[in-house]
Structures are given as C-alpha cells and as structure tokens.
Image: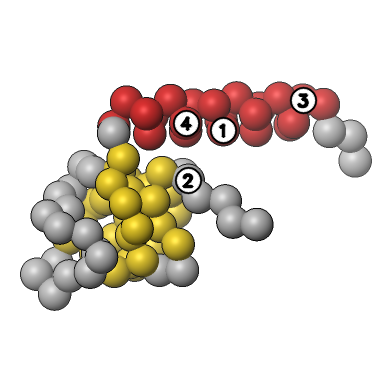
Amino acid sequence: MCLALPALVVDVSPSGDGVVSLGGLRKQVSFALLDEVQVGDYVIVHVGYALSRLDPDEAEQTLATFAQLQAHHAQTDTP
C-alpha cells in the first residue's frame, strides 16, 4: 500500500527538479512529469517524483485531517 500526502513546493529549478516541504521536512524531487510547477503549488510525491498537482484548499484540508489524527493518537497511545 502507498500513502501519498500533499507536499508544498518551496523551490523549482530550471533543470526540472526542486524541493518540497512535508511537515517541515524538505525533500529533493523531480517535476519532470508535470507542466509548469510553481513555488506554492501542492503536489503528490511518490519515489522522488511529483505525480500530480493538487487544489490548495483540498491539500490544506487533507493536511489538517492528518494533523487531527496525529493529535488524537498522541493523546490515546500509551507506552
């Protein structure tokens, strides 16, 4: 199974690659499979490639849902 999360594009280079941020972690990825990626776009990344661009509102909603799940599990998990 593969889980894909929205990643925020923070840098795009002329060579077709760049950097995304996911929860504060930055990762070098290729944008070769997408046209006209810009800083501020949200993309889905798999194995180092941005596969698709996302609607910003949908991306923010998905990230908020995952943050709520993380907070819930942090409160209910016992060591």
Query: Among all residues in the image, which is located at the extreme bottom?
Result: 15
Q: How crowded is mark 2: few (under 14 residues within 10 Å), some or many (20 or more)?
A: some
Quadrant where the N terminus sits is bottom right
Residue hosting label 2:
5
The numbered mark at residue 33 is none
Q: Disc 4 designates what residue? A: 62
- Mark 1 highlights which residue? 66
* Identity, as a three-letter code, of the amino acid under mark 1: Phe
Cβ atoms under marks 1 and 4 closer than 8 Å: yes
Question: Mark 3 or mark 2, which is nearer to you?
Answer: 2
Sequence-first disc among 1 and 2 = 2
* For the residues bearing labels 4 and 2, Cβ distance under 8 angstroms: yes
In front: 21, or 56?
Answer: 56
Horizontal side, residue 49 vs residue 79: left or right: left
Q: What residue type is labelled 4?
A: Thr
Is disc 3 placed on a helix, strand or loop?
helix
Distance between the Cα atoms at labels 1 and 4? 6 Å
Q: Mark 3 points at which residue?
A: 75
Whether residue 29 sits left or right of residue 16 in the image: it is right
Q: Is there a contact, CB below 8 Å, between mark 1 and mark 2?
A: yes
Which of the 4 quarters of the picture holds residue 15?
bottom left
Distance, label 3 to label 2, CA atoms, is: 23 Å
